[in-house]
Amino acid sequence: MAGKKKEQKAKKEKPLDRWTIKELREEALKIPNIQGIHGMNKEEIMDLLRAEKGIPVPEKKKSSSVRDIKAKVDELRKTRDDARGQGASKDRLNLLRRKISRLKKKTRR
């Protein structure tokens, strides 16, 4: 029995975005006058619980869309090709290659 209490206490301490959908639904069902919880997705339930408990919404990190990232990759490729044509140093070309590689990795996440 003591193990269950520890688990419940640990669940309550972690932030809402780390809770499972099942845990969020169980908590949302305790709120009176709310209907349609089982039809809501995780984001909707978290917003509902934040509003009910007065928890501020965390700021999201700036993230670029895949299209924006690919446009930056194209620009860097053009810059790299121009630099090759002008006989740029190996260091400059390696720098551009690494930037392109980093951006391409972001599109796969």
Image: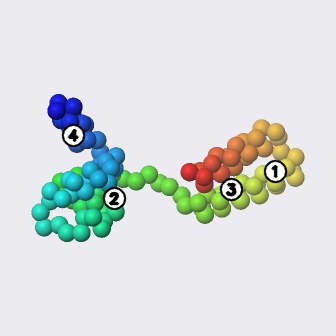
Q: Residue at x 36, y 53 (%)?
A: 59
Return the residue nearer the eye: 2 or 89: 2
- Dot 2: within a 10 Å radius of its alpha carbon, few (fewer than 14), some, or many (20 or more) residues? some
What mark, if any, has residue 73 been given in the picture?
3
Q: As drawn, is 73 to the left or to the right of 49?
A: right
The residue under label 2 is 42
Instruction: Report x, y in % for residue 36.
Output: 24, 69
On residue 8, the disc is: 4
Q: Secondary structure at mark 2?
A: helix
Mark toward the start of the polypeptide (4 vs 3): 4
Q: Which tag is nearer the camera, tag 4 or tag 1?
A: 4
Q: CA distance from mark 3 to mark 1?
A: 15 Å
Q: Secondary structure at mark 3?
A: helix
10 Å crowding of disc 3: few (<14), some (14-19), many (20+): many
Dot 4 amino acid type: Gln
Query: Does the image show residue 8?
Result: yes
Identity, as a three-letter code, of the amino acid under mark 2: Lys
The mark nearer the N terminus, 3 or 1, is 3
Q: How is the model colour-coded?
A: rainbow
Write down the residue under mark 1: 83
Q: Is 13 placed above or below 107 here?
A: above
